[in-house]
Amino acid sequence: LEAGIGDYANTTSPPGEMRMVIDEVQEIIFLPDYRKDHKSISRILHSSKSSRILHPSKSSHHGTTLHSSVMDELRDYVWTIASLYNDNPFHNFEHASHVAMSVTKLLSRIVAPDLDHEKEKNLHDHTYGITSDPLTHFAIVFAALIHDVDHTGVPNAQLVKEGAEVARMYNNRSVAEQNSVDLAMGLLLEPRFKNLRSQIYTNVSEYKRFRQLVVNSVMATDIVDKDLKKLQQDRWETAFGDTTGEDAQTSTNRKATIVIEHLIQASDVSHTMQHWSIYRKWNERFFFECYQAYREGRAEKDPTETWYKGEIGFFDFYIIPLAKKLKDCGVFGVSSDEYLSYAMENRRQWEATGEEVVAEMVSKLKQKGLLKNDRP
């Protein structure tokens, strides 16, 4: 298995060139085909190793809890990942945990199939197969946990501008995201996590699907890269537009792939689609992180002057359209309505009180002696 995984990794880049995570992004990730695999899918849903990892404190329906050695490795892995996060005001392990919780919530709102064959098949089709593959669930939560590992507290554009080594390593594209994937996946492949790996995938095919899901999910969190954004937009229009002439399995997996990407995108900014107090907490942290970069000469614009209008634009051109897409894809039930409702309300409240909020945050900077040039 380990040799096969090594062979697969070596085929993801041209001979003599370093493999780039961004080149692994798939237009379509093929999940298990219910029509061919419905018996094995039913068995996996109720006794899978992956589902037990997702709920380690519980027994699976027809299985047992994870062995203590696997739990020890899982705790060790999460602890090590946490230690690889930098102490940024926003992009830190608490943010990763918040994103992971949001992902878990959205996945839980997709009702799992029951044992009735026809109902199971119908729900599998309705949710594009996402409900039927525990490995998909685990990969998405895993991606949420590791998506900002080693984030430096500045955007990719700044790393490129500074000529950072990590930027050169990844050809100045999706720098932080590619670095996070490489660090986290490299860690997982260390010998000390052998038992943990055996509970996630058991063959090269499962490893390939796991990695593809992680790569697509993490790379989807780069919402600035123009090429990636265009590819995602094109995939959405293809998936939910006219798919006449495309076979059913390809169409279903195309929809699954784009829904997964939008799920983690929404979770990455889920604070904007939650209660006002949650939004305020994370908005302030991101403001402090951006101001810290400005104060250190690593950002050109002073966020104290641009934050109010910037947030309105962020709501209008990214957050609200994203929340509407969650609703349009039709698999998240009441959660999509909830996310859109909170996004609209937070936008309304920010427009009404945002200038006062910014003044309050600036006052906090001044009290801490962090305001650049001690401006009034």
Image (cartoon, rainbow, N blue to C red):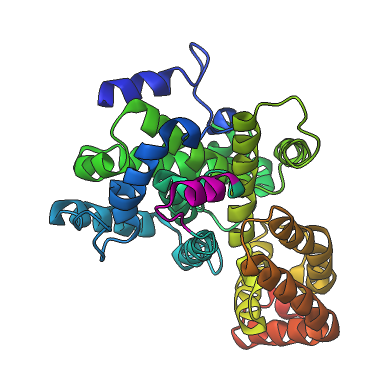
Residue drawn at (78%, 29%), measured in percent from left and top? 244
Question: Is residue 150 visible to the viewer in this orientation of the structure?
Answer: no
Q: From this viewpoint, which residue is outermost toward the left? A: 68
Q: Main secondary structure of the magenta part?
A: helix
In the picture as drawn, the residue positioned furthest to the top comes out as 15
67 lies above or below 198: below
Q: Position of residue 181 (x, y in %)?
A: 47, 41
Q: Is residue 209 magenta?
A: no
Q: Which residues are magenta?
A: 112-125
Q: In this orientation, does residue 366 appear?
A: yes
> Does residue 122 belong to the magenta stretch?
yes
**Rendering quarter of residue 252:** top right
Taking 325 as reference, is 316 left or right? right
- Looking at the picture, tell me which residue is in the foreground, 290 or 35: 35
Residue 240 vs 64, above or below: the answer is: above
Left or right, 69 with reference to 272: left
Is residue 271 depicted above or below 329 in this figure?
below
Residue under the image location 75 percent in, 24 percent down: 245
**Residue appearing at x 71%, y 40% in the figure:** 232
Task: Name the residue at 39% across, 54% down.
Answer: 84
Q: Quadrant of residue 64?
A: bottom left
